[in-house]
Image: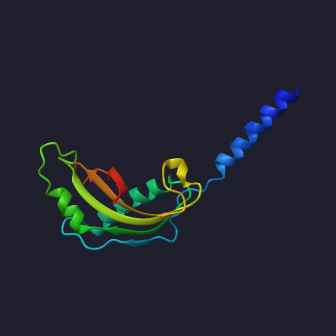
Amino acid sequence: MKSICRYIIVFCVSLLTTGCVSKGEIDNAEIEYGESETFTQHELEAAVDTILKKFKDFPDCELHTLQYSEELTQQYQQSDEADDKYKGYEIVAYVSHFTTGLESDREGFTPDSDSDFQWILGRKNNKDEWEILNYGEV
């Protein structure tokens, strides 16, 4: 009986501790949409929404800035490598800065540090929703 109670207690504690890690914080983020030669403000906002939704999955991280990069967008759109994984996509690129907390190592982040990420989003045509094709440290 004692061992059953012990297992139940360990199970409950593990459930409580895994549920206590905060989700990615986006509420105070500064969003810079910039200007695009290719995309409308509405299209850039839709791309930002896709990134913010994904960032909420980053445990114990706080987003500070998210900025559209026309330069990176043009680089990816004009890439003509034969094996380019972005071929056939309309591409939009953003850069972000965020900090990680002590619990963020669960997703492979360095705890309690600053991170700069690039976000590469794509869609096959302007009727499709944006999907994140790649993201990671700059």
Residue at 20% x, 57% y is: 76
Q: Nearer the viewer, residue 113 or 55?
A: 113
Name the side, left or right, on which 25 lies relative to 136.
right
Q: Which of 125 and 33 is in front in this view?
A: 33
The percent position of residue 108, horizontal first and vertical second, equals: 48, 49
Residue at 39% x, 56% y is: 50
The percent position of residue 91, horizontal first and vertical second, equals: 24, 56
Q: In this view, does 78 lie above or below 8?
A: below
Which residue is at the far top? 1
The percent position of residue 104, horizontal first and vertical second, equals: 54, 54
Residue at 52% x, 68% y is: 27
Which colour scheme appears in the figure?
rainbow
Q: In which quarter of the image is the N terminus?
A: top right
The percent position of residue 32, horizontal first and vertical second, equals: 36, 73
Name the side, left or right, on which 36 lies relative to 10.
left
Name the side, left or right, on which 5 lies relative to 47.
right
